């Protein structure tokens, strides 16, 4: 399949995760755990060192850094500073992270416009009453996230594997969409094979070739990914999250979560009570 036939514009989705503003006194430090989404941190004033994995950046007024999904980070204020943050997801074919297709920079200067996007989204977050203004803000937020993703893409290099990955995910897009919509249900491999128009054995081979894991392991991974986002972004208890992602047995869910992420669901929720 030619990449032009994929029509990714029909499958791209962005999702707001969180936004806000934090004031730092000089010398204050914060260490963040790996988050299940991307996050920009932008400086309104002051100066702060931001450590992202093995990289470090001195963030000044109007500048921003991108903290990738699943990356540890640390912030160290060099002087009194005001920092905006904005977390988001950008996906294609329901589950494929768009940024996984690019070699992208982590630092964005004033000219990038990222600071303006982060600050505008953060300043809209307190509109809680369900009014037309709130709806307008929601639409504006989605538009701004699209703009941020585009700004990153413009400064990025497409990875060599991108076309092959896109084509493979395209062939399974209906299956992936079904899984995403039914994570709280029992999902049978025979059902997925029927959606793909393949025999169960052929489907298993094709799925593992494209995604590198079996359908069963993929479903578990997606349930845990969604659970992790819920633990960060909602007030649901661990038991409620467990049920919402398809596990009635909370202890079984906690075991799976701990094995994959090296921390219990309760421990992870506590460690992400603050984003920056």
Image (cartoon, rainbow, N blue to C red):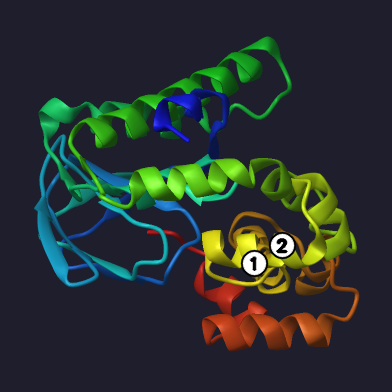
Q: Nearer the viewer, residue 206 or 20?
A: 206
User: For the view shown, which residue lies furthest in the top direction?
Assistant: 132
For disc 1, the marked residue is: 205
Q: Nearer the viewer, residue 276 or 14?
A: 14
Q: CA distance from mark 2 to mark 1?
A: 5 Å
Q: Is residue 204 visible?
A: yes
Q: In the visual, does 259 lie left or right of 32?
A: right
Which residue lies at the image location 36% right of the left edge and 34% below the top edge? 149
Residue 158 pos. (x, y %): 25, 42
Q: Which mark is residue 120?
A: none
Residue at 62%, 60% (x, y): give it.
206
Residues at discs 2 and 1 in contact (Cβ within 8 Å): yes
Q: Are there few (<14), some (14-19), or many (20+) residues within 10 Å of tag 2?
A: few
Numbered disc 2: secondary structure:
helix
Residue 107 placed where, x, y %?
16, 47
User: In the image, residue 186 lies at what x, y percent?
Assistant: 90, 64
State the image quarter where residue 150 is shown.
top left
Question: Does residue 4 appear to the left or right of 104 in the view shown?
Answer: right
Q: Could you say which disc has been placed on residue 202 in the image?
A: 2
Evaluate whether residue 88 shows in this view: no
């Amino acid at each position: 399949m030619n990449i032009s036939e994929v029509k990714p514009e029909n499958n791209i989705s962005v999702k707001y995760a969180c936004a806000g503003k934090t004031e730092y006194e000089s010398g204050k430090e914060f260490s963040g755990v790996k988050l299940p989404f991307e996050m920009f941190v932008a400086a309104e004033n002051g100066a702060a060192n931001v450590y992202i994995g093995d990289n470090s950046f001195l963030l000044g007024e109007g500048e921003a850094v991108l903290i990738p999904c699943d990356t540890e980070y640390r912030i160290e204020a060099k002087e009194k500073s005001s920092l905006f943050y904005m977390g988001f997801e950008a996906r294609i074919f329901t589950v494929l992270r768009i940024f996984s297709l690019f070699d992208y920079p982590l630092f964005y200067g004033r000219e990038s416009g990222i600071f303006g996007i982060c600050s505008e989204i953060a300043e809209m977050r307190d509109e809680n009453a369900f009014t037309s203004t709130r709806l307008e803000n929601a639409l504006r937020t989605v538009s701004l996230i699209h703009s941020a993703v585009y700004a990153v893409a413009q400064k990025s290099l497409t990875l060599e594997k991108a076309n092959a990955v896109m084509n493979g995910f395209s062939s399974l897009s209906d299956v992936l969409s079904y899984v995403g919509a039914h994570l709280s249900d029992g999902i049978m491999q025979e059902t997925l094979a029927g959606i793909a128009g393949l025999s169960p054995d052929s489907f298993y081979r094709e799925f593992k070739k494209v995604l590198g894991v079996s359908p069963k392991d993929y479903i578990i991974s997606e349930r845990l990914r969604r659970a992790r986002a819920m633990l960060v972004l909602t007030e649901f208890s661990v038991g409620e999250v467990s049920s919402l992602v398809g596990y009635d047995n909370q202890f079984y869910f906690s075991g799976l979560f701990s094995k994959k992420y090296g921390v219990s669901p309760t421990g992870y929720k506590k460690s992400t009570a603050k984003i920056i």
